Amino acid sequence: MNRPRRIATVLAAALLAVPFGASHASATDDTIPDSSSTTSIDSAPSTTATSTTTTLPPISPPQRGRAEIGFARIILDEQRAYIFNTRRRLIATLPVSTGTDDQTPVGTFKVYSKSAQTYFSPDPTERMRWMTRFTKGREGAAIGFHGIPFRVTKNGEVPIFTPLGQYPVSHGCIRVRVTDAKWIFDNMKLGTTVSVLRTRR
C-alpha cells in the first residue's frame, strides 16, 4: 500500500471512531409511545448520553434479588445512577432519565418514604410504581426513584416515552427500569444517602 492511500485509510478509520452526541431533549411526558414498546421497558438503551467524561461504565443488567444498599450517586450529565453497598463497593450502574430544565435538585439527601404505586398529582392518569423518595422539587413535589411511568387508558397501561441513559425527560424524578425500581424499593432503606451531582468532575 502506498503512503497516500495508507494516510487516507487511517483518517477514515479515525472519523468512524468519533462518537456522535445524543440529541437534545425534545420529548415531554405528553409523548406516548406505541403500545408495542411495552415489551422493551426493561431493556438497556443502545446509546449513551453525551458526557464530560470520555468513557462511561457499562450499564448493569436489570437488578433483582437482595442487596445491602449503602448509598446511591446520580450523575446528571451521564444519566446514570451508581449504587453502592454498605462496604462502599459499586454493585450496580443503572441507566436513568432525570428532570428536564434542571428540575432534579443537586445535593445530598436521605430516603424518607416509599410507595408501591403513586401518581403525578396534576394528572392522576399518569402513574408510576416503586417510588423511593429522597427530596422535594422546586414546587414541593416529591423527588425519588421510580419505574417508567405509564398512562391508564381504556386499552390498558401505556408506558410514557423515557430514553433511559440518554437524556432527561422527567418532572424531576429519577426514572429507572421497572425491575430496577422494584429492586431499589426493596433494598434501599429509609435514611439511605442519595447524592445528586451534575458531573463527576
Image: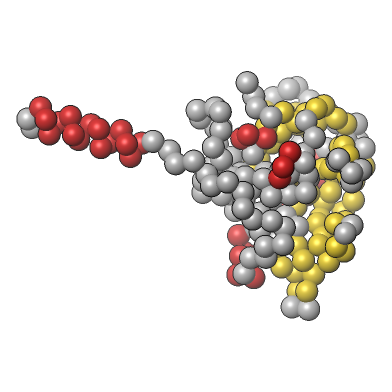
Nearer to me, 78 or 90: 78
Q: Is residue 42 visible?
A: no
Q: Percent x, y for residue 149? A: 75, 57
Left/right placement of residue 192 relative to residue 41 reads right
Q: Residue at x 20, y 35 (%)?
A: 9
Q: Is residue 33 visible?
A: yes
Q: Residue at x 85, y 41 (%)?
A: 137
Q: Residue at x 78, y 30 (%)?
A: 106
Quadrant of residue 192 within the rendered picture? top right
Q: Which quadrant is home to the C terminus? A: top right
Q: Percent x, y for residue 83? A: 72, 33
Q: Which quadrant is home to the N terminus? A: top left
Nearer to me, 83 or 14: 14
Quadrant of residue 195 within the rendered picture? top right
Nearer to me, 2 or 84: 2
Residue at the outermost left position:
2
Q: Percent x, y for residue 85? A: 75, 28
Left/right placement of residue 129 relative to residue 21 reads right
For the image shown, how many numbered marks are present on the structure?
Answer: 0
Q: Residue at x 11, y 30 (%)?
A: 4
Nearer to me, 147 or 84: 147
Q: Percent x, y for residue 111? A: 88, 36
- Position of 124 relative to 6 (above/below): below
Quadrant of residue 65 within the rendered picture? top right
Identify the coloring: secondary structure
